Amino acid sequence: MTHSTTDARQTWFDCGLTVAGVVLVAIAHLVWGQRGLVVDLVAAAFIVPLVLVDLRERRLPDGLTLGGAASLLLLLAIEGAATGDLGPWAGAVLGALAMSGVLLVLHLASPAGMGFGDVKLGLLLGVILGSRSVGLVPGALLVAGALGTIGGLVLMCKHRRRDVTLPFGPYLVLGTVAALASLA
């Protein structure tokens, strides 16, 4: 199989998983009746590819992290202007600052342990959480840290080494999903 054939299959696979992720978000909204459907659908379209790239390549592309955060902030600003309620937009800004701020401190304390892509992913995830409640950020980070610790321990045992690395983006996403699920 040629390199371009493999790339094409990977692209189709990633697109399929992204569509599946967006559909699951839509179904979750139908079942639990949460607010923020459009925000969550747009977010899923950025987050699923981010997780796939992080798992495969151990990086989080700026176009998806920063582009996703900017897109959601713009969407929330438009929604706020239309309804006269800028509360979700203001909360999104605070959530982005809170989540990425904590991750930035961790990155500065240990750049090898926390990549800067995770800090930028914190902007995107913080926007989502903050648009609901800034108070969701600590719980999301706690869950992400706990799951990441378990994942790291499993990898250390599997490889019988302590110097293993793991992509932390998927754990940040799981923490965010858990925090949002607490609202249901």
Image (cartoon, helix red, strand yellow):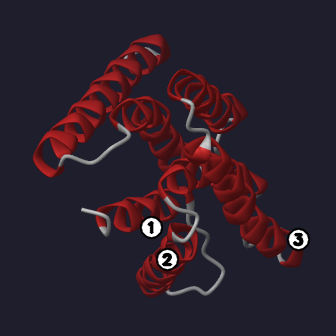
Q: CA distance from mark 1 to mark 2?
A: 7 Å
Residue 181, percent from left and from top: 30, 63
Residue 43 is left or right of residue 13, and the answer is right
Q: Nearer the viewer, mark 1 or mark 3?
A: 1
Q: Which residue is mark 3?
A: 108
Pick the front one: 152 or 3: 152
Q: CA distance from mark 1 to mark 3?
A: 21 Å
Neighbor class of circle 2 (other Cα within 10 Å; few <14, some 14-19, many 20+) is: some
Tell me the SS state at disc 1: helix
Residue plotted at (11% across, 47% down):
31
- Kindly give the residue lying farthest to the front in the view shown: 84
Q: Which residue is mark 2?
A: 139
Q: Which residue is mark 1?
A: 175
Q: CA distance from mark 3 to mark 2?
A: 22 Å
The answer to whether residue 94 shows anywhere in this view is yes
Q: In the displayed structure, would residue 31 be above or below residue 69? A: below
Residue plotted at (61% across, 70% down):
165
Residue 74 is left or right of residue 21, and the answer is right
Residue 58, percent from left and from top: 60, 51
Give yes or no for contact between labels 1 and 2 (Cβ–Cβ under 8 Å): yes
Residue plotted at (73% across, 57% down):
119
Sequence-first disc among 1 and 2? 2
Q: In the displayed structure, would residue 8 be above or below residue 53? A: above
Q: Quadrant of the N terminus?
A: top left
Residue 19 is left or right of residue 93, and the answer is left
Residue plotted at (53% across, 49% down):
131
Q: In the displayed structure, would residue 78 be above or below residue 124? A: above
- Kindly give the residue lying farthest to the right in the view shown: 108
Neighbor class of circle 1 (other Cα within 10 Å; few <14, some 14-19, many 20+) is: many
Which amino acid is tagged 3? Leu
Which amino acid is tagged 2? Gly
How many dots with numbers?
3
